[in-house]
Image: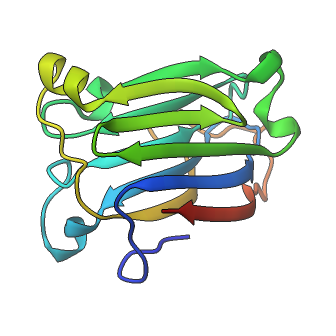
Amino acid sequence: MNTGNKFSVQYGRIEARIRVPKGNGLWPAFWMMGADFLSGRPWPYNGEVDIMEVLGRNTLEAYSTLHAPAYNGGNGYGQKYPSPGWVGLSGGFHVWSAEWDSRGITFKIDVQTVFVASKATVESTRGPWVFDHPFYLILNLAVGGDFPGPVDGTTPFPARMLVDYVRVYQ
């Protein structure tokens, strides 16, 4: 799902109820891209907010990360965190959310806060905050690549990331 040129949001609670797949090389994600990317502002100057990324080879943990010019790619500003109760995330649905305002972004899984990105902290430790403008939403299941690693004979195909709902509150 990609809401580019259809829907964008600046601030609010953005959430989705998702069941991720398990398998080597699978890379489910729920993220936002700065809407100005669509009018030619290059990544990472437009900003990227990864609300959730899971590597299918290890569904006992997930990632929430910010990407901007001074902190991007493997140097993104974010947090790896364990699944609730150390139970594999592929075993059921979970609600991932980002609560975003002009002071920062709080990332949650179910009702548990897993990472807080304060604008003041980011600007004093990493670099400029580029997240005070509209973003569009993306939910996707990537296959392969440097981060998730390759698929192998144990990777289940077809693989599916199930999405029960996506909600935006302002």
Q: How is the image coloured?
A: rainbow
Q: Residue at the location (16% across, 76% down)?
A: 39
Residue 64: where, in percent of width, then height?
48, 33
Q: Residue 46 in the image: state x and y as whole percent.
A: 19, 55
Which residue occupies the foreground of this view, 99 or 30?
99
Query: Quarter-wise, where is residue 25 in the image?
Result: top right
Foreground of the two, 145 or 7: 7
Q: Locate residue 164, reporting x and y percent.
A: 78, 62
26 relative to 2, above or below:
above
Task: Please report the residue visible at 43 percent of the width from the left and 77 percent of the height from the top.
Answer: 7
Task: Quadrant for the N terminus, please.
Answer: bottom right
Q: Which residue is drawn at 52% across and 21% down?
A: 80
Task: Give the image quarter of residue 151.
Answer: top right
Answer with left or right where residue 13 lies relative to residue 72. right
Left or right relative to 93: residue 12: left
Q: Report whether residue 146 is seen.
A: no
View extreme (right): residue: 91
* Closest to the observer, 21 or 44: 44
Q: Find the residue positioned furthest to the bottom.
A: 6
Q: Quadrant of residue 148?
A: top right
Q: Is residue 31 visible?
A: yes
Check the image and report above or below for 37 versus 101.
below
Identify the residue at horizontal 76%, vertical 22% (top origin): 84
Left or right of 79 in this view: 18: right
Q: What x and y, as percent, mark residue 50?
A: 44, 43
- How many callouts does the rendering have? 0
